[in-house]
Amino acid sequence: MSGQKSILLLGSGFVAEPCLEYLMRSGNNRVTVACRRAEKARELSDKYAGATGVSLDVEDDAALDAAVAAHDLTISLIPYTQHARVMKAAIKARKHVVTTSYISPAMEELDQAARDAGIICMNEIGLDPGIDHLYALKIINEVHAAGGRITSFESFCGGLPAPEDSNNPLGYKFSWSARGVLLALRNTARYWQDGKLVEIDGKDLMDSARPIYIYPAFATVGYGNRDSSHYRERYNIPHARTCVRGSMRYQGFPEFAKTLVNMGFLDDTPQPHLAAAADAAPLPWNAVTAQLLGSASAEPAALLAAIEAKIDTQDPEARKRVLHGIKWLGITSPDVAAMRRGTYLDVLCARLEELMMYGPGERDMILLQHKFEVENADGSTNTRTSVTLMYGEPDGFSAMAKTVGVPCGIATQLILDGKITATGVVAPMTPDIYQPIMDLLPSEGINAVEETL
């Protein structure tokens, strides 16, 4: 496959530009950036010669079918709930698709149809999922090739502010909507620990956080991320008595987040008194918090006392840090106005986004660690680690955007060049798919440092 190729890029969010920038380097690609709002698409496409921005409603099946059919490949960076719709259009047109999302049941159902159409529906090729798969499978397959086996696998990944910019009580900042981050705190975690299947209910997730030791300079903690129990099968490590994939945050995040959970701020039930209205008076934050807690008094001191009773940790210093964070949020203040967003969750999200977005010149950080306990063919044992650490560019691409968008761009180019050929609904789980991608990542500044302990 050579010559000029046409690519349909659905979505113009924060990960789209690093993907687009990579694809435009070849000089042989023409990319159509498509969004519901044409001006948003053009805002991105106008930065790159050879890119065009258009309006497209992906829920308009006829329009989607026509757009997909007019291009050699479609990249879907829209919400994952729409990927199956895009894949159906691609199967009709016999055109390839790439997404960075986990393979959902609705997507998996299309595997045979994609094979029959002779197309590649590549998924899970961002950061997590994506880069995490590549470096995990590299070591797992090396161990297996030498006759050894993996007896424990732990993987934790965090998108965090760089240390110098982690200057708030949560030690966290948002590159995009806070809603998804908070909703993830409600997910149940399932994983294998010492031969036992562990299930942690979402309301208790923060209580399960534990220290993750990577570099002495970082005080990081981790907790399970959704259901990682099936990775013993996906990664072909049946002897792993421990198998867990999780999220990483800075120390102090779980205690603060758990307090917000205990207060009821993750409730997304519509609340009439929080609904937006043209003639609605400003809503003081202390009034919102008082109603949420069922407090008879909205005085800041009374609210802080009620909140202190919601703090689970008994560590005096940690309790002080949580209360300091509550004051910093301003949610007990009569002088700070809450945005009317309809639910307690969304009102809190609006406040967090006011206070915790990246400012000019600030940078984010990606930290990913795989840790393997290995039993070698001769019966000896050792520990192997693989660590990816990457910083964003101040006023440039964030590390998160780059580590999601660039692998997606690389996989797209490899498919167009005929170097990835496995058809069906696939993820980078086999060497024929992941090795060509890994070969190109270091030149983009994305790599892993491996150690054997």
Image (cartoon, helix red, strand yellow):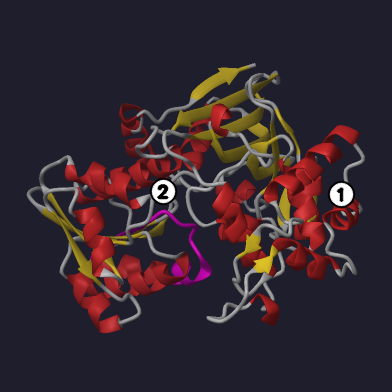
Q: Compared to 391, does 194 lie above or below?
A: below
The boundaries of the magenta stretch are 94-109
Q: Amino acid at mark 1?
A: Ile
Circle 1 SS class: loop
Quadrant of the rendered image containing residue 87: bottom left
Q: Is residue 130 at all visible to an observer of this figure?
A: yes
Quadrant of the rendered image containing residue 399: top left
Residue density around tag 2, few if under 14, some if 14–19, many if 20 or more, within 10 Å:
many
Q: Amino acid at mark 2?
A: Ile
- Residue 241 at x, y percent in the picture: 74, 40
Callout in the foreground (1, 2): 1
Q: Is residue 358 left or right of 233 when viewed as pictured?
A: left
367 falls in the magenta region: no
Which residue is tagged 1?
A: 311
Which residue is tagged 2?
A: 125
- Residue 208 at x, y percent in the picture: 79, 45
- Residue 105 at x, y percent in the picture: 52, 69
For marks 1 and 2, give the CA distance.
39 Å
